[in-house]
Amino acid sequence: MSKIIFKGDIVFTPTKDKFQVHKNSYLVVEEGKVTGIYGELKKEYKDYPLRDFTHKMIIPGFVDLHLHAPQYPNRGLGLDKELIPWLETYTFPEESKYKDKDYAKKVYSRLIKELWKVGTTRAVVFSSIHKESTKLLMDMFIESGLGAYIGKVNMDRNTTLNLMENTEKSIVETEEIILEYRDKSPLVKPIITPRFVPTCTVKLMEGLGELATTYGIPVQSHLSENTSEVKWVGELHPEFSNYASVYNEYKLFGQTNTIMAHCIYNTDEEIKLMANNGVFAAHCPYSNFNLSSGIMAVRKFLDKGVPVGLGSDISGGNSLSISNIMAATVQASKIKWLETDKALQPLSSSEAFFLGTKGGGSFFGKVGSFEEGYDFDALIVDDGNLGDIDELSLEERIQKFIYIGDDRNIIERYVHGKKVEEPK
Ligand code: GUN
Ligand code: FE
């Protein structure tokens, strides 16, 4: 049986309300999973390989629950518009380029390298509508050793001509990818990806819901990000009482594991449906600032029992760094509290850390924590340049890393117990 022992200053969040810390301790990994944390190394473990990271922090790898791979070249560009005109002016033209696999390869290799660099060990990713480029992206993730769900985008209405799919073909190609990739890799899996209600006909949503439930494949989409979008969905589907019910009707809302990005304008009824169906919300604060979308009431979702994780939403979002996004999550929650609703208590740093690790990680199973039985997905963090580590508590060191650390502090990354080297 393969066993490895990691020694260092261990920090994680089994619950959101506080950091659990183990200074100068030993974490035992067997067959890729955590089996225990000890202050002293038990005699029976003495003969196993020891990775000694004394004075370094060992923390769970970051989980990005929402990003668009083909939008990577657009980071920082065209953020002068709101969602719908932004999609039409900047996003759709860029996504059209992924018909060309060579172009896709160039962009996707940069993206995967950057995800590795910033410490994202698991990601849930939108590709473009293109089957071949999507398969390429999946193969590149498999090659990298990082974990991911990757979805070919489906859209057959209200988009530019060269991204408008034939409904039947969109469903058939999605099924082909599912069959080819569902058992290809333990770490990289397909996810069904209707872009959002405005770009998907009822026939398409029905077909995708059928695929999801037939094959037990998860689903990702967008929900209530922008006021014009919500209004548009109401005009397209007056037969439904709200946006979430459209997805729910077509088995795209928790009938299999589901992530909905943004969730800024949800009604209480929709939040209740998310909680009942176990639908995850991906909070993407940078994107919500950049596209003037609004601020999600994360506190309300947590209180109502909706599972929540964090997303970069590249390129609505400008940073892939989940640690930056953790800080932005706390900042956004303070503005929400201050400007909108004094009942929405701001988030603490341990809560933001939880969302970016175990919160999003639960979408993948036992991921994002170091409790017994969890996959050992981890970052080794050298925070020696961020403060006097002998004077600071571990709770203080992790906060400093979240707010002022960056990829230069991350010296090694692990997924399921295996070290992930810099992608080529
Ligand atoms: N809603 C539909 N498509 C998109 C997208 O590409 N980005 C964001 N932020 N919202 C969307
Ligand atoms: Fe998005």
Image: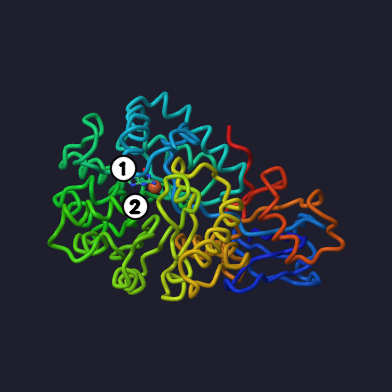
Instruction: State which tag comes first along the sequence, 2 or 1.
Output: 1
Colour mapping: rainbow
Q: Position of residue 308 (x, y in %)?
A: 46, 64
Q: Is mark 2 within 8 Å of ligand 1?
A: yes
Q: Is residue 144 left or right of residue 100?
A: right
Residue picked out by circle 2: 226
Which quadrant: the C terminus?
A: top right
Residue receiving disc 1:
84
Across and down, in percent, residue 184 comes to 40, 47
At a point 78% along the width and 62% down the height, the residue shown is 47
Cα–Cα span, label 2 and label 1: 9 Å
Of residue 273 and residue 14, the one placed in the foreground of this image is 273
What is the number of callouts on the image? 2
Disc 2 to disc 1: CB gap under 8 Å: yes
Q: Would you say 18 lies left or right of 312 here?
A: right
In the structure shown, which secondary structural element does the residue marked by tag 1 occupy?
Answer: helix
- Front residue of 236 and 393: 236
Disc 1, ligand 1: is the CB inside 8 Å? Answer: no
Q: Position of residue 25 (x, y in %)?
A: 78, 67
Three-letter amino acid code at disc 2? Answer: Asn
Report x, y in % for residue 422: 62, 38
Secondary structure at badge 2 equals: loop
